[in-house]
Amino acid sequence: MPLEHHGIEPVPVADPGQGPEVADTSALRRSAPAAAAARDVDWRDFREHLATAEKDGSRRWLYPKKPSGRLHRHRTGFSWLLLAVMVAGPFVRIRGNPLLMLNIVDRKFSILGFIFWPEDTVIFAVAMLVFLTSIIIFTTAFGRLWCGWACPQTVMMEMVFRKLEWLIEGDGPAARAFDAAPWTWRKAARKALKHGLFLGLSFGVGNLLLSYIIGSDALMAIIRDDPARHVTGLAFMVLFSLLFYAIFARFREQACTFICPYGRLQSALLDENSMVVAYDHVRGDGRGPWRQGDTAGSRKAAGLGDCVNCRQCVAVCPTGIDIRDGIQMECVNCTACIDACDAIMDKVGRPRGLVRYASLNGIKTGAPLRFTPRMAGYSMLLGALASLLAFLVFTRSDVETLLLRAPGGLYQEMPGGRVANLYTVKVVNKSSHDLPVSFRLLNVEGRVQLAGGEGFVVPKEKLGERSLVVDIDASRLAGRRTPLVIGIFSGDRELERVKTVFVGPGA
Ligand code: SF4
Ligand code: SF4
């Protein structure tokens, strides 16, 4: 039975072009010419040009069809959750600090309400290590799961801007026809509505990014105060808004293909056991239309597989590629082709999963995708690294103390057989509240006095500096240089310990 009789709309074969393949998918590549020989498969050299570019280099605009299906529903729900977290990030407060803020201007970062400063070098070093290792491990095991499900670019583009566009201009062929139609007042009004909404949304996204960078309080100050006092902030507001408008209205999938380095890393990170969105060439090739009376057996006898060459998987692809050509750099693992193909398989009565999450080895051997020991091992390693980071974060002190002996000073002999040393102490208060601090000797009996009187309050997020006099009975000294451990306290709570030496007259 022709596809149309199944309610399946075949897509013209000469539609979108193909992009370069980056991983070793030789098995898949070999399968395509075989399919071409079997029936009317369009075998093109997709490595010659990008899916989004014509051969002369001009832009090929994509009109993806709206996906629907099980995975799309899950992705939509998950995206709304992510969007809620993304929008709430800079505004929700934990212990008075933003849930997430990456203030690169003041070099101040807030993650889950914990404030980090450039002084937190160990944490930053471990965080960078965890980040880089996570990318490598995660991608090697789970491919581009991040791109399809959690990347802000994909979420905003596919779940917000694209859906708005489909609502106003229609999807797939309808949108193509709308664009090709002559200009009328109605068309102009719909275009104006779309771009007006895109601009408004981009303004929102730009402001959101700004609030991640400078903090929501600073953003509100820019909005409420006299604009003349916030020229730089306003300039960035406009810049970010225009940037996001350009990305979501024009640049689109090219941001993933041309700019994002993560897609390019695929070629280095993926191997034949990585989980990717893949076409099962063993089951699907050779490709050919489903005809009336076709059964799995009759197709097999005719040298045909389950792929009915309907190109629905291509029609829904937001990057314009054909998943049947193998893993390609442009594929963001959005799963739209899985849903599209599953719907076709349902219609022709064949099992779902011709396009599915699978590893290339799994496809070759026919083994279902399993949570392999390798994935388990990588996940455990990731968990261990994340735990180390969490430990460092949760046990991090609120203060960073630097204790230096006063320059040029040795020691001073005091009445009653005591010896005194002078120090300079600098305390960085990393918390979001003013912190009264005091000092105690922990390993030797003696006194610590603040020069200029007692009472040392370090303002929140600031550095406080005082001079400190330590005096110890000479009989308790261990020669000319006595190691000292000084505790920094806030009330009775010990915040940190620092080590130094106490210089005395010696034996
Ligand atoms: S090939 Fe499939 S998973 Fe990859 S981007 Fe296209 S539709 Fe999404
Ligand atoms: S893989 Fe599935 S959706 Fe794609 S052409 Fe073949 S049958 Fe159609």
Image: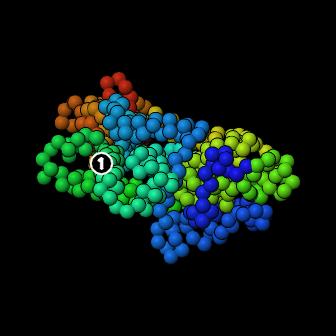
Q: Is residue 194 left or right of residue 283?
A: left
Q: Single out the residue that lies furthest toward the top.
A: 492
> What amino acid is found at the position of numbered circle 1 in the picture?
Gly
In the foreground, 363 or 261: 363
Please give the name of the residue rendered at 66% of the width and 69% of the height, measured from the top-left corner: 44
Residue 493 vs 388, above or below: the answer is above
In the foreground, 482 or 118: 118
Q: Is residue 375 left or right of residue 423?
A: right
Please give the name of the residue rendered at 69% of the width and 56% of the height, measured from the top-left corner: 309
Q: Secondary structure at mark 1?
A: helix
Q: Where, by quadrant of the figure, is residue 339 drawn?
A: top right
Q: Is residue 45 left or right of residue 156?
A: right
Q: Single out the residue that lies furthest toward the bottom.
A: 56
Q: Is residue 436 visible?
A: yes
Q: Is residue 317 left or right of residue 98?
A: right
In the foreground, 66 or 93: 66
Q: Where, by quadrant of the figure, is residue 451 drawn?
A: top left
Give residue 113's position: percent from left, percent from top. Answer: 38, 35
Please give the name of the residue rendered at 74% of the width and 57% of the height, measured from the top-left corner: 287
Residue 501 vs 140, above or below: the answer is above
Give residue 476's position: percent from left, percent from top. Answer: 40, 32
Q: Single out the residue that lies furthest toward the right.
A: 301
Give residue 363's position: percent from left, percent from top. Answer: 76, 50
Judging by the rendered image, the residue that carries numbered circle 1 is 200
- Binning the other alpha carbons within 10 Å of mark 1 as few (below 14), some (14 to 19) or many (20 upward) gives some
Q: Classify the position of the C terminus by image quarter.
A: top left
Give residue 135's position: percent from left, percent from top. Answer: 56, 50
